[in-house]
Image: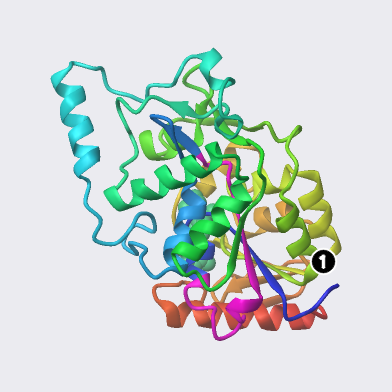
Amino acid sequence: MFSPDMTTFLAGGTGTPKLLAGAGDVFDPADTTVVCNTGDDVEFGGLFVSPDIDTVLFDGGGVLDREFWWGIEGDTTTTHDELERLADAAGIPEGPRYLDADAQTSGRDISRWRRFSGAREFMTFGDEDRAVHVLRTSLLDEGESLTEVTRTLADAFDVPYDVVPMSDDPVATLIHVEERADPMHFQEYWVGERAAPTVADVEFRGADAATAATAAVDAIREGPVVVGPSNPVTSLGPMLALDALREALDETRVVAVSPFVEDDVFSGPAADLMAGTGREASTRGVADAYDFADAFVLDAADGTDLDRPVVRTDTRMDDDEDAERVARACRDALAEVGA
Ligand code: GDP
């Protein structure tokens, strides 16, 4: 049953977590569900890592390292450093070291097309952070779904809202680049290469066969949806590639916060990814990509003229007070479209 009090946030790894950090007085956490992108997920040395889920868990649990918007504040990197020392001592060439093609599609299903050797981790995992990956992987191997494991971890971190993945099936965001024949996983493109390669296309491998998580679809059907400032290609793209999720979004009230001020992006690779996939890298390009959105929150300095209702405010979020202001604008925009 639809209730305007039940709100679902769609999250990547930076923008929506920033918004959630200050949204609690506007959207009651007890009535809030956060659906996380899992296209960025990756496996290193057999450990399954869900970066966007983890940022939401650590944010909600009050332990996120807010300087980087990933990892746990004050975490140590003893295991990561020792892995590097051993790999150096053994003369193992630098990574990323993809497992071979057979290994990419055998074993644990959820890790398909994104398996890396742990011999050279090109992402840094803190020691406490790694404990989360060990627990997640172990519970997955015991037979729990990613939805169940995510909720277990959310309980462990005392997160006040429900956190669920977009799917319990593998969907891997692969970036096709001009510089080489084989696509690179999003994490190699972004963390390993700092978005230097030229984007030719973006593929969500597995999305055609994947089913959206029931909890995610049910939450979207239950009440209005807030799309925090997100990367439309690699954070929302994998979700929109899931038919049931897209259909649910078409049928509910949605407000989206622009990650741009006209054609200036706040941070990250969204502009390059939009240009590389034939979109306009701007607020207008975001609105075109989000045909399911009923209203938008734009920055006060963003004069883009859209065909849907717009609420303007200062959308830069440097602290929780900023986030609360943007959350109120989201609430106002939803009210304008009857939610
Ligand atoms: P990722 O998972 O870290 O790649 O990122 P997200 O999908 O969460 O996207 C973050 C997007 O939010 C980027 O495109 C930024 O331009 C945008 N962003 C980051 N900080 C802010 C902010 O304070 N305000 C707004 N409006 N957008 C932001």
Q: Which residue is drawn at 39% across and 70% down?
A: 62
Q: What's the image's color scheme? A: rainbow
**Residue 40: percent from left, percent from top:** 52, 42
Going by the numbered disc 1, the residue's amino acid type is: Thr
Task: State yes or no: Cβ of the residue under disc 1 lies below 8 Å from any atom of ligand 1.
Answer: no
Q: Which residue is drawn at 80% across and 45% down?
A: 243
Q: Is 269 displayed left or right of 308 in the figure?
A: left
Q: Is residue 287 visible?
A: yes
**Residue 217: percent from left, percent from top:** 76, 56
Which image quadrant: the C terminus?
A: bottom right
Examine the rendered structure and indicate whether residue 34 appears above or below residue 130: below
Q: Considering depth in this image, is 326 or 287 the residue closer to the camera? A: 326
Q: Can residue 264 be seen in this view?
A: no
How many discs mark residues in the rendered view? 1
Q: Quadrant of residue 73?
A: bottom left
Q: Which residue is drawn at 82% across and 57% down?
A: 248
Report if residue 22 lies within the magenta region: yes
**Residue 26: percent from left, percent from top:** 59, 84
Q: Is 133 displayed left or right of 167 in the figure?
A: left
Which image quadrant: the N terminus?
A: bottom right
Q: Name the residue under label 1.
A: 252
Q: Residue furthest front?
A: 142
Q: Residue at x 57, y 59 (%)?
A: 151
Q: Considering depth in this image, is 122 or 145 the residue closer to the camera? A: 145
Q: Considering depth in this image, is 243 or 288 the residue closer to the camera? A: 243
**Residue 188: percent from left, percent from top:** 43, 32
Q: Which structural element holds mark 1? A: loop
* Disc 1 residue crowd, few under 14, some 14–19, many 20+, Cα 10 Å: some
Highlighted magenta segment, given as a residue range: 20-41
Report if residue 193 lies within the magenta region: no
